[in-house]
Amino acid sequence: MKREGHEVLEAANGQQAVRAIGTKQFDVVVTDLRMPGMDGLTLLQEVKKINPGIEVVVMTAFGSVDTAVEAMRHGACDYITKPFQPEELVLVIKRTLERMGLTKRIKDLEALVGDSFRREGIVGKSPVMQEILKLIASISHSDGTVLISGESGTGKELVARAIHANSPRMHRPFVTLNCAAMPDTLQESEMFGYVKGAFTGAVKTKPGLIEEADAGTLFLDEIALASNSAQSKLLRFLQYGEFRRLGDTQEKFVDVRLIAATNSDLDAAIKQGTFRQDLFYRLNVIPVHLPPLRERKEDVPLLVEHFLRKAAKAAGKSARRFDAAAIEVLMSYDWPGNIRELESAVEYACMLSQTDTVVETNLPPQIRKAAAAPLAHAAMTLDEMEAAHIRRILEASFWNQDHAATALGIGRTTLWRKIRRYKIEVKKRNRGNSK
């Protein structure tokens, strides 16, 4: 460690380490788990009490990996199994310090999202999406492994591509593998490659996707469906940066940043024994969670505009906008298929439109039917239903009262009276429309 330029202090036991940490600033603690007196797990907890910013790396025997995983659950950032070579510990410390540098950069997220930031098709101005964009900007410059979670259709691959596009690897390959689209028997050979004669039909040596991604990014979608053998080899690659092609005896090393994604509950998969807990902790270095569209409906109008431009251009249609009533329906729908379902709905409506404006009747029938159901709720009075309807039209019109009155089929003065009667709080328009 000293040859690597680090200042190092040794402690004979856990109690001595705690006293030292209380009097001097440290970045990383490396500790064994099994020690006389204070064990490593207790030391970890004491360290975090004194300074939560100190990272802890635990050492454990190969047969006690479960204990190391338990330590990571209590705040350890990494573990290393004995016996190990000094170079392996150097690599673990380097990785830990890189993560600490990333954490410090996150404190200045606003400055990182500038005009040069590449969104790669990510659309949204809601607070939650702004935070995700800031997070993407901050983690793009790191090589830390990323685990993206979220329901199907929330845009996990777009986020992975944005991380790559804003990273120093942006001009190198971005390689994808969908574990759900490949049988278990082929995952390992597709991911890591194979040599001639490794199995029946292997008539020539074939590099895997992990080699194709050398110096770039490998994106593994639906990682929860990775086979047991693929999980095992992936874990070793994440630990040591090495792997073997199927049937080969030689280790290979590549420089790859790994991004994984899942729409499954990995905690449940771990309990069921279908996903390795130690692999989860290796993948979940930088977690990114994408919310479902129903939790950020304020982004729906922006997404609609974005998808309509694409759909109209592809189909040669003249549609340029959705009217307020159509936007109201889209805003009231819960979108179980998330952004992917919204894009399909916009494409459908664009194809049916006959003018430059998409109207409510152009929308898919199942969406119109589902969106209409809440308005028929028996518990609402007629006044409550009218007030809710007016509010939705105002929101869909970006609070432009002229446009809202036209959509409602009433005059501007009548709309103003109803706003006063129902005590609707009129928000400042977020579009540059004139009154």
Image (spheres, rainbow, N blue to C red):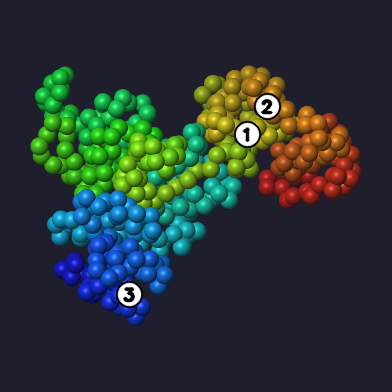
Q: Is residue 346 left or right of residue 82?
A: right
Judging by the rendered image, the residue that carries numbered circle 2 is 370
Tell me the residue at 44%/59% (across/down). 106
Instruction: Give the quarter of the image for residue 254.
Output: top left
Determine the CA span between mark 2 and mark 1: 9 Å
Determine the CA span between mark 1 and mark 3: 52 Å
Whether residue 359 is visible: no
Q: Tag 3 or tag 1, which sits nearer the N-term? A: 3
Tell me the residue at 42%/49% (across/down). 287
Whether residue 370 is visible: yes
Q: Nearer the viewer, mark 1 or mark 3?
A: 3
Judging by the rendered image, the residue that carries numbered circle 3 is 18
Tell me the residue at 52%/30% (across/down). 340
- Tag 2 secondary structure: helix
Judging by the rendered image, the residue that carries numbered circle 1 is 334
Name the residue type under label 2.
Answer: Ala
Q: Which quadrant of the rendered structure holds the C terminus?
A: top right
The answer to whether marks 3 and 2 mark residues whose Cβ atoms lie closer than 8 Å is no
Q: Tag 2 or tag 3, which sits nearer the N-term? A: 3
Above or below — where is 20 with respect to 106?
below
Name the residue type under label 3.
Answer: Val
The answer to whether marks 2 and 1 mark residues whose Cβ atoms lie closer than 8 Å is yes
Q: Nearer the viewer, mark 3 or mark 2?
A: 3
Q: Tag 1 or tag 2, which sits nearer the N-term? A: 1
